[in-house]
Amino acid sequence: MTVGRLSSSVAPHRARPGRVDGGRVLRQALTRPSLPALVVLALVLAFFAVRAPELLTSGGLAGVLDIAATLGIGGVAVALLLVAGQFDLSVGVLAMSSAAVTAVLIGQAGWGTWPALLASLACALLVGVVNGVLVVNTGLPSFLVTLATFLVLQGTTLAGVRAVGGSGRIDGLDEAPGWSSAAAVFGSTAQLGDGRFRVSLLWWLGVTAVATWVLWRTRFGNAVFASGGARTAARELGVPVRRTTVALFCLSATAGWLIGTLSLVRLDGVQVSSADLATGLDFLVVAVLGGCLLAGGYGSAFGASVGALLYAVSWQGIVLAGWDPPWFQALLGVLLVVALVANGVVGHRLKGVPRS
Amino acid sequence: MTGSGARGLELRGITVRHGSVPALSRVSATFPAGEISCVLGENGSGKSTLVALLSGLRRHDEGELLVDGTAVRFRSPRTARAAGVATVWEDLAVAPLLSVWRNFFLGAEPTRGVWPLRRLDLESARATTARAMERVGIPGLDPDQPASRLLAGERQSLAVARALHFGASALVIDEPTAPMTVARQTLFGQAILAARAQGLAVVVVTNNPRYAHLIGDRFLLLADGQVAGNLTREDVDADGLTALMAGGAQLGVLTDALTELHPELGER
């Protein structure tokens, strides 16, 4: 454990000429998944700092971070799945569904806030298990499996809430026992200058930090990387690929639940609506902007968070610059193409396995 | 290696079925410790099923598999490695995007701390990897570089070093000769011989009879999932092994039939 012993055992290996040189740091930086996203983020920030100076005031930043937090939580979960070579389209709709379950249990069944939250978390985990088990047992593309889940959840939630509540809206939940403590955990705000910063920001940072640690410093993280980048090798070495995949779907379902709970507490209620597929794709966009390869095996939670920030800055920048909002879609499309090309170049270089 | 008769791997009437079709049927063989046993056979003769069985990827439907005299039933490659049986896979089982040390320990990472703070023991993993790579003739390798940056030969060495590290009692090597330079093949052969010298049971699965005869002590011939021959080095020379490999009797019948139809073939 001592530094002396460690360096003496490692030092001789560093001396290999031609392979380990001064360019190593630079090369490592270039192979970071988040690098293109960071560069583009800096460019976009600089651009909007000129066109819409309010963006960099505390009010503007609070708006940006508010958007980025929700996107980032889902984006990090989807990024982990992408690294493992899978994808989850149902995160967005699961947020709405689990918020609806919580709201119905509190508003109609008269449950306490915390039991209702736990029950909806259990429902979300069940959805995650179903997604995961279906994917690993059928071998179907997870895109299609979660598309089916998306449709089932959306239909069930809309019909269910209308049947129970009479309309698509359930509110007036703040009378429920335990609501104030839940509001403190999921809905606190802090006023800094003229910006109102929400606690979702802390959840986002926490999720990113934990996901990064898990990905790089645990067995589970190693299994995630191997499941996506080299599934045959992982299987041959006894890495629990199936268990890892199911666990990741549970994680993304939990992220969906967290997003739903954050919005439920913020709005004191839930409005179910027929969301389009784009809400499910936003998280994918964010993860890809952050440098995840669609083929799996490469990506980072930090990158996905940078991607979320990039998304939020572009959105808020266009609003504050007074442009017509549809320009945002166009800009996002351009950013996506840039990210895909950059990721493709990186992936190609990394995967170029030398042959004798 | 007298006196350690039970050491090594033993198959007793092993049957493995793919659905209802037996890929191996009632195969009995011993792979003693301290010897190199070569498994030879055509494509589809059951060689890869044997590798899958020994490495824990498949379970046997009938019969017994013994490691050092104890009957085992591997649930996964993880349990096989835990029992001291490690495999060098035909495709080497190297994940190109992972670093060398992550590849080395993939599926059996050293950890420290208690859950939920259990984490990879980075220092020991890196140091062990560097030492193990040095042992197979690649000194000074940076264990942090991605495996995709290794040369083809270095990737093979990584697979061998990993198997040597985890294979306490047996080493299973699937088709080692695929794309290799002579220098690499020499190094590879040295590693196999070193493993034999350490008293491991070495099983080399190959379809190159000359290479098999060069390094092997005993030869198991498989055909259609059954044992077609069980020979030692004294029983057979390289040419004999090649003839057996090429389907011996079958080829003779084929030659006769073809020369009968096309007499000009007989003059070749």
Image (cartoon, rainbow, N blue to C red):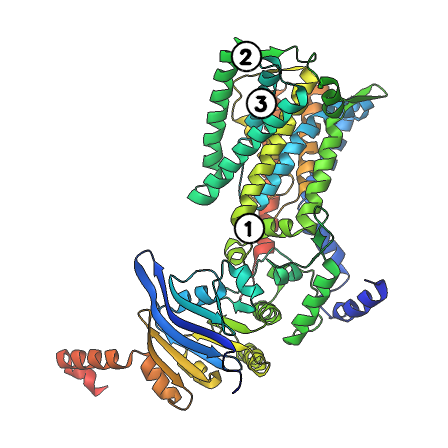
Residue drawn at 76 percent across, 56 percent down: A25
Amino acid bearing label 3: Met
Report the front residue among A348 and A3: A3
Q: Quadrant of the N terminus of chain A?
A: bottom right
Residue occupied by mark 2 = A168
> Which element type, helix, strand or loop, lies under badge 3?
helix
Q: Residue at x 70, y 13 (%)?
A: A174
Please give the name of the residue rendered at 52% of the width and 37% of the height, measured from the top-left corner. A129
Sequence-wise, the earlier of marks 1 and 3 is 3
Q: Residue furthest bottom?
A: B234
What x and y, as percent, mark residue A64?
73, 26
Q: Amino acid at mark 2?
A: Gly
Q: Can you identify the residue that label 3 sits on?
A: A96
Secondary structure state at the residue bearing disc 1: helix
Q: CA distance from mark 3 to mark 2?
A: 12 Å
Q: Which image quadrant is residue A261 in?
A: top right
